[in-house]
Image: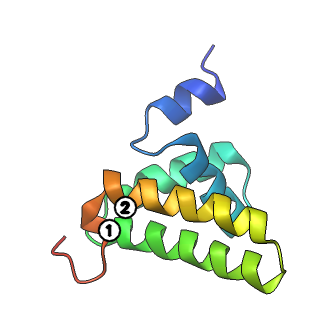
Protein backbone atom coordinates (compact mmCIF):
# COMPACT_ATOMS: atom_id res chain seq x y z
CA UNK A 1 0.00 0.00 0.00
CA UNK A 2 1.29 3.46 -0.89
CA UNK A 3 1.42 5.85 2.05
CA UNK A 4 1.39 9.64 2.24
CA UNK A 5 5.12 9.48 3.00
CA UNK A 6 5.69 7.51 -0.21
CA UNK A 7 3.75 10.08 -2.24
CA UNK A 8 5.58 13.00 -0.64
CA UNK A 9 8.91 11.27 -1.34
CA UNK A 10 8.03 11.10 -5.04
CA UNK A 11 7.89 14.91 -5.29
CA UNK A 12 10.77 17.35 -5.44
CA UNK A 13 9.35 19.15 -2.40
CA UNK A 14 10.01 18.76 1.29
CA UNK A 15 7.26 17.88 3.74
CA UNK A 16 7.39 21.45 5.06
CA UNK A 17 6.94 22.87 1.55
CA UNK A 18 4.00 20.54 0.97
CA UNK A 19 2.51 21.63 4.31
CA UNK A 20 2.84 25.28 3.24
CA UNK A 21 1.00 24.54 -0.02
CA UNK A 22 -1.67 22.66 1.92
CA UNK A 23 -2.07 25.62 4.28
CA UNK A 24 -2.22 28.12 1.41
CA UNK A 25 -4.74 26.18 -0.64
CA UNK A 26 -6.72 24.67 2.25
CA UNK A 27 -6.01 21.16 0.99
CA UNK A 28 -5.10 17.88 2.65
CA UNK A 29 -1.39 17.12 2.34
CA UNK A 30 -2.05 14.33 -0.18
CA UNK A 31 -3.71 16.78 -2.56
CA UNK A 32 -1.07 19.43 -1.82
CA UNK A 33 1.63 16.88 -2.75
CA UNK A 34 0.01 16.32 -6.13
CA UNK A 35 -0.54 20.04 -6.71
CA UNK A 36 3.01 20.92 -5.69
CA UNK A 37 4.51 18.23 -7.91
CA UNK A 38 2.37 19.41 -10.82
CA UNK A 39 3.36 23.04 -10.29
CA UNK A 40 7.06 22.21 -10.08
CA UNK A 41 6.86 20.80 -13.62
CA UNK A 42 5.27 23.92 -15.14
CA UNK A 43 7.46 26.64 -16.68
CA UNK A 44 6.67 29.18 -13.93
CA UNK A 45 5.42 26.68 -11.37
CA UNK A 46 8.35 27.03 -8.95
CA UNK A 47 7.71 30.78 -8.88
CA UNK A 48 4.07 30.05 -8.05
CA UNK A 49 5.07 27.80 -5.14
CA UNK A 50 7.46 30.51 -3.91
CA UNK A 51 4.60 33.03 -4.07
CA UNK A 52 2.33 30.70 -2.07
CA UNK A 53 4.91 30.42 0.71
CA UNK A 54 5.40 34.20 0.72
CA UNK A 55 1.65 34.72 0.99
CA UNK A 56 1.55 32.27 3.91
CA UNK A 57 4.28 34.29 5.63
CA UNK A 58 2.34 37.50 5.04
CA UNK A 59 -0.84 35.93 6.45
CA UNK A 60 1.03 34.71 9.55
CA UNK A 61 2.45 38.20 10.11
CA UNK A 62 -0.99 39.81 9.70
CA UNK A 63 -2.32 37.33 12.27
CA UNK A 64 0.53 38.31 14.64
CA UNK A 65 1.77 34.72 14.54
CA UNK A 66 5.48 35.47 14.50
CA UNK A 67 6.60 31.92 15.36
CA UNK A 68 4.71 30.52 12.36
CA UNK A 69 6.03 33.30 10.11
CA UNK A 70 9.57 32.35 11.19
CA UNK A 71 8.90 28.68 10.42
CA UNK A 72 7.58 29.59 6.98
CA UNK A 73 10.55 31.88 6.33
CA UNK A 74 12.82 28.92 7.05
CA UNK A 75 10.77 26.85 4.58
CA UNK A 76 11.07 29.63 1.99
CA UNK A 77 14.83 29.92 2.49
CA UNK A 78 15.33 26.19 1.98
CA UNK A 79 12.96 26.17 -1.02
CA UNK A 80 14.92 28.98 -2.70
CA UNK A 81 18.22 27.20 -2.00
CA UNK A 82 16.88 23.97 -3.50
CA UNK A 83 15.01 25.62 -6.39
CA UNK A 84 16.83 28.78 -7.54
CA UNK A 85 14.64 28.77 -10.65
CA UNK A 86 11.81 29.95 -8.39
CA UNK A 87 13.34 33.44 -8.13
CA UNK A 88 11.12 35.94 -9.90
CA UNK A 89 12.69 36.90 -13.18
CA UNK A 90 14.46 33.56 -13.54
CA UNK A 91 14.19 31.93 -16.92
CA UNK A 92 11.93 28.87 -16.71
Q: Position of residue 89 (x, y in %)?
A: 23, 83
Q: Quadrant of the N terminus?
A: top right
Q: Residue at x 66, y 58 (%)?
A: 71
Image quarter for residue 50? bottom left
Q: Position of residue 73 (x, y in %)?
A: 57, 65
- Residue 86 bears which disc, if any? 1
- The reply to whether residue 25 is in sight is no
| 77 on left or right of 7 | left
Q: Secondary structure at mark 2?
A: helix
Q: Residues within 10 Å of mark 1 (few under 14, many from 20)?
A: many
77 up-or-down from 2: above or below: below
81 up-or-down from 45: above or below: above
Q: Are marks 2 and 1 in contact (CB under 8 Å)?
A: yes
- Residue 80 bears which disc, if any? 2
Q: Position of residue 27 (x, y in %)?
A: 72, 57
Mark 2 or mark 1: which comes first in sequence?
2
Of the pair 77 and 49, the residue shown nearer to us? 77
Q: Residue at x 64, y 22 (%)?
A: 3
Q: Secondary structure at mark 1?
A: helix
Q: Residue at x 55, y 76 (%)?
A: 54
Residue farthest toward the top in the current orientation of the protein: 1
Amino acid sequence: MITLDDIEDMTSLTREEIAAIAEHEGLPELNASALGDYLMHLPRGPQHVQQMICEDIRAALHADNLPHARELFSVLSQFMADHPEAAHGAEG
